[in-house]
Every structure is written in C-alpha cells, then in structure tokens.
Image (cartoon, coloured by chain):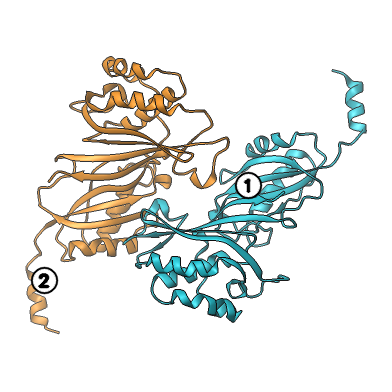
Chain colours: A orange, B cyan
Amino acid sequence: MDIHTNMEKEAVPAMKKRIRMTVAYDGTNYHGWQQQNNGITIEEELNRHLSELLEEPIQVIGGSRTDAGVHAMGNVAVFDTRSRMPARKVSYALNQKLPKDIRVQKSEEVPADWHPRHCESRKTYEYRIYRAEFPMPVKRLYSYFTYHALDVRRMREAAAYLEGEHDFKSFCQTGAQVESTVRTIYSLWVEEQGADLVIRVCGNGFLYNMVRIIAGTLIEVGQGKREPESMPEILAAGKRSAAGPTAPAHGLMLIKYEWLD
Amino acid sequence: MDIHTNMEKEAVPAMKKRIRMTVAYDGTNYHGWQQQNNGITIEEELNRHLSELLEEPIQVIGGSRTDAGVHAMGNVAVFDTRSRMPARKVSYALNQKLPKDIRVQKSEEVPADWHPRHCESRKTYEYRIYRAEFPMPVKRLYSYFTYHALDVRRMREAAAYLEGEHDFKSFCQTGAQVESTVRTIYSLWVEEQGADLVIRVCGNGFLYNMVRIIAGTLIEVGQGKREPESMPEILAAGKRSAAGPTAPAHGLMLIKYEWLD
C-alpha cells in the first residue's frame, strides 16, 4: 500500500467527464422516462443508482422522454461525473444495481459539450400490432391487439404520404411546447411478421405522441375508416383533431438512436 | 315469456358434452399448470372461472402439465359440461372472466371419450436463448439470456443425434413416474433469429423436463463443454446425470399441440 500516492490522488479531484449510455427498458411498470410525482420513472431509477454507484449526485439527460408504458431497446442518457470509474465499466457496475426491467447496453465517454437533443440524430421506433381472434398472453405487454381486419396495402399507401419533411402539427398532442413542428421522416414502413404487423418509422425527431398518432391514423386507414389519399389533408389541417386516435403506449418501442457525429 | 317452455327445459337436463379448448398463457406469474398448494396455477384459474361461467363444478384435463414459469401459445384442456352454452361460445365468454395472462384461443366440442393424453399427438416446443453482452429487458420474461458465445453448427450436429425414436431416460428429471421413457422426436432444429437462438422441437410426447434438459445439454455443446458426438453415449447411459443441466423455465414455450384424429 502506497499511502502517500493515495493521499495525493485524493487531493487532486478527478477531471469531470461526460458519459453516454444506451439504455433499454420494459416500460410496463414505469410512469415513463421523466421524473414526476405520481409514480416511479426510468430517469429516477438511473439517477438514484448512478448516484449511489459513483458516490456523487448524478442527474442524467435523456434522449427521448418516452411516455408511461412505452418500451426501449436503445434510448440514450448522458451525465457528468468526477468518478474515476472508466466509462465502459459503468454499464457493468450499474446493471448490478438496476432493477431487471432496466439494463444499460453500453457506456462510453463523449465530449463535455455533447447533448443528445442538441445534435443531428436519427431515431427508429416500432409500433407493433397483433392481429388475431383473441389476444395472445405472451404478446400482451409489447403489442397492441386487434381483431379488426387491417388492409396492409392501404396502410402502406397512407404511410408513403408521411415520408419526407412535413409540418406534423396534426400528429402532435396538443399542449406540447415546441418551437417548430416540422420534422423529417426518413422512412415509414408497414411490415407483416406473421400475425404481427409492425409500423417501423425512422426520422430526425418526433413530436409528443407523434408515432402513436401516426400508428392510430394508419390503423384507421387499415380498417377502411380513412382513405390513404387523405394524409395530405391531415398534414395541411395543422390541428390534432384532423388525425386519428393516439394508439396505446404498450405497442411502442424505441429501437435505436443514432447520431451523425 | 313462455314460462311453460322454460319449465320443460329445466326439467330435462341437457346432454353432457366434452369441450376441448386451446389455451395460451404467460407462465411468469403461475406455479405451472397443475393444481397444488403453494401457489396459483393455470388449471385452477380455468376450473374456477369455468365453474362460475357454466354454473356447475368443472374440472379440466390438461394436455401438457407445464412447469412454473413455462409459457404456452397452444396448450390444451378438455372438460365435460351439461351447460347449453354452445362450445364455440365458451372461448368468448371465458376470456371475459380470465386474467389477462390466460386466453382461450379456441373452444370446440369433441367426442365424449376424447382425452388429450390418450391419443396420438404431436407437440411443438420452442426454447429461446437471447445472446448479447447484456440482458434486454423486453426479452427477459420469454428467453434465457447468455453472454457466452454459442457455436450453432455444433449445436445442430448434436441435435441431429436426438431426432428419431430413443429411450430418453437420461433427459428425464428423476422422480418422474412413467411407464416408458421411449419417445420420438420428429424434428429438432436450432434456428438463428437475429440475436435470438431458437431450439424448436417437435415430438410425439416429452418426459418431465425433457425439453429443458435437451436445451441445457445443447447449450453446453454450443459452449464447447460437450462434444456433439457424445449424444449417443448420453442416450445409452440411461441416467439423468449423463445429460446437461435443466435450462431455466422462462425460455420455454409450448407452441402447439396437434392430434392425428
């Protein structure tokens, strides 16, 4: 034991560093990402266990503030720390503490000014629909069940109108405060996987409830309640009431978050 | 209201009929299929809700008595009733009463002597393994997580030795009371589905824990702890200790049950 060296180490505080984590979770038992008063959240669990692990108060910044019940395979969180723990080791150590329905998939150091919401990024979400006469218990937490027939060809036609850069104000929950409601959807596919129908959407950003409102609108098109050709009118209307219902949260999963840096 | 007709109906009891149901469930919160004292079971839930629905004591006979934590998309249960409810309607009415993690997929009348375990049948099970550095929360309830590399080619070689008719005594949990330990495996495939590895087995019947012991043994082969060529020796040994460990229950799903009638 070199006591002298240890004392020197303690005297000089470690440099502050920023760590980025890829975070996966089952949203079933959480009141969404963001800290609030009426139930436990993903953010709260991360803050609590990181603070305990690194022995300093930690406050993460989330990439996507997912709603209650929404799942993620690849959300992102960054935080600053003076801990000497190597960035890569944080995932292993933190996963020992977190509840089983939250798991860090990766942890790495990023530049001190890197912020998940202030840089160009691409997010991919999937909305999963299970089509059958009766619900399937093992699918109930991760897909929206419907016994209605859905015309997939019509849904694909409608989806094509939403690709590209548009003002998605009609697909944004009212009350959300954002500077601009213009977003770009790089791709919006409707894919059949057996009895599952998966709406996969990739874009540079999504407004509050936007993916769930797109899913709810495409479902109505699939049921014949709306025409695929009505999508441009919905976009042009610029009001929430023009679009379809907000599909239930548990069918939605944030698949991945990518940065162009 | 034709009171006279109603009275006549009550005077003549309905014919007894046998109803077969296809039952799906998430085994996470159950102590398996079979009624017991230390926890709630699938059988118990079915009996309780059927008795309430049909207003007579109902006792189902199960096709496969799955263990605690094992899931099913297509287990089978039959029961006798004098209720006038049409067989097909039972599924709809019962699903209104059952908890969300149990759902009847189909109900139909069968001959009075039909018994799920006394007729030629074919059962298909899947054992799902998720391979990654860290567990994925949304997969945790329905697959076995491993960070060990698995050599799929070796697992397939080993699997081929187990296909066909064999005495599977080495792959049967000790203590199980059965007349014969000879079973026929029609097919045993190891399939890659992205990060998931699925062991799919179809046979005329399975001994207690047989699929989980096959999975545990194939996993050891995949890890290089056993040779594919050692399968014939394991079969020949005729003792449980010759095979690998029993893989955890939550990775197992009874996919379907078919009859040759």
Q: Quadrant of residue A232?
A: top left
- Contact, CB < 8 Å: mark 2 with mark 1? no
Say if A169 sits above or below A205 in the image: above
Going by the numbered disc 2, the residue's amino acid type is Glu
The image shows a total of numbered marks equal to 2
Circle 1 — which element? strand
Decide if residue A95 is on the left or right side of residue B171.
Answer: left
Going by the numbered disc 1, the residue's amino acid type is Val
Q: Residue at x 12, y 47 (%)?
A: A114
Circle 2 — which element? helix
Residue A10: numbered disc = 2
- The quarter in which the N terminus of chain A is drawn is bottom left
Say if A16 sits above or below B220 in the image: above
Q: Is residue A172 visible?
A: no
Decide if residue B174 is on the left or right side of residue B130.
Answer: right
Q: Residue at x 73, y 39 (%)?
A: B53
**Which chain is disc 1 placed on?**
B
Which residue corresponds to mark 1?
B23
Q: Residue at x 53, y 65 (%)?
A: B212
Decide if residue B162 is on the left or right side of residue B91.
Answer: left
Q: Residue at x 44, y 43 (%)?
A: A142
Callouts 2 and 1 on one subunit: no
Residue A115 in the image: x percent, y percent? 15, 45
**Which chain is disc 2 placed on?**
A
Residue A104 in the image: x percent, y percent? 29, 56
Nearer to us in this view, A85 or B230: B230
Residue B20 in the image: x percent, y percent? 71, 45
